[in-house]
Amino acid sequence: FSCFRLSNFDSLVRKVSKQNKKDCAIYMYSNPDNIGIYNNIKCGVSSSKRMLGIMEHLSTTGKFISFEKSYGELQNDDLLNFLQNNMKKVSTLRARPVLAYLSAVNKNVSSNLINISNEDIKHFVNLINDVPENIQEIDIILHSRGGYMIVARQLVEIIRKRFKKVTYIIPYIAHSAAAMMTMSGDEIIMTPESSMSPFDVQMPSPASNEYYPAAELKKIANEARHAHNPFNPFISKALYKDWDSRTIRKIIFDCSISISMTKNYTIYWLMKYMFNNFKAVNYKFSYYLVLPWWIRLTKNGRTAHKIASFFTNPKIHIAHNNPVMFNDISDIGLNIQCADSELLSILRETYILTDELFDRSIFTKLYINDKQHVYTHKKEI
């Protein structure tokens, strides 16, 4: 059940549906050899829609029929022991230490409880300090819907200052700021069902407090600026009555800086770490936050710019949480690969255990390696 066979989902669904004379859907299990057939998703739609339906159902339920037999009677401490044992398996298989950042992505709680935030920094530092100083390579298992870009950048700087080689492993979800973090890795490993997402900055509108892509909000602010111009009768001033000139200037400035930072840091990390080709301009970039003009002239520079444009352009993905699967980005220049069968089985089991553990408890985040674990939980205000 490897990546190249994922494209055979459609034909497999059709065969099973024809044999059973009813609609069906395919679910993926911890064990790659196990496949279960259910009557929940209709096959009478296009193959792309059917594939999205299968993946979406996997994300919303997180339940597997084989799970009940294997783990259903275990206590939370037992589940945690299984998780730590999985970390040891990955560490042994990959011959390097493993650090996992897991959040309750399927839990029905406020996003503020599971976002990448300032509290993550101290726990990352504690787990990093467990690694002997002579070890310069590490794997980071990342399972998060994202959060604050500034904190993601701080985590990247902490991790990359300590380790010369970092591989990000995505068992299921690394969206938004978490996806941006993976751009600082030397390598990315995904599973057939795991996904990243765009990391275009989302900012609140002063009129409604709803979040919009920074590029779109900047466009709205420019319209508001033109609406306040007495010589422009074509834009209704009533639409922007809550937008004063100071707010408009602040929004345009904040959006411009956020868009520039997100894109430029992505290119910078790709060039410096994944492509190992960006040491001469560290000081200039960190001081002026401007990439040298000649970067686009190099092959790696063009590739990095293409990758950054793909992930930061809201027009490409329509929605901020639109999943980006392995097959969508396998050929855009990232050093990315699909987990082999042995690692794939461990990662799927890790996702199942993580989802069940958060489902049973009040906790919303877990930091874990093969030596220690830390839960965190914030009360919703």
Image (tube, helix red, strand yellow):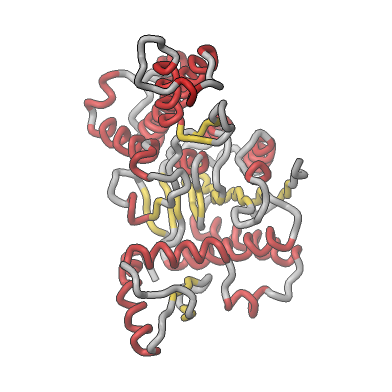
Quarter placement of the N terminus: bottom left
Front residue of 6 and 185: 6
Residue 36 in the image: x percent, y percent? 48, 80
> Which quadrant would the C terminus be assigned to in this image?
top right
Q: Residue at x 41, y 35 (%)?
A: 273
Residue 225 location (% of width, % of height)? 43, 16
Residue 164 against residue 348 in the figure, above or below: above
Res. 82 image quadrant: bottom right
* Residue 141 is at least partly visible in this image: yes
Identify the residue at horizontal 51%, vertical 39% (top origin): 177
Q: Is residue 364 above or below residue 154?
A: below
- Judged left or right of residue 28, residue 337 is left
Q: Horizontal placement of 226 versus 303: left or right? A: right
The answer to whether residue 159 shows anywhere in this view is: no
- Report the residue at 73% width, 49% height from top: 375
| Number of marks | 0
Q: Nearest the camera: 128 or 122?
A: 122
Horizontal relation, residue 214 to residue 317: left or right: right
Left or right: where 357 falls relative to 250 = right
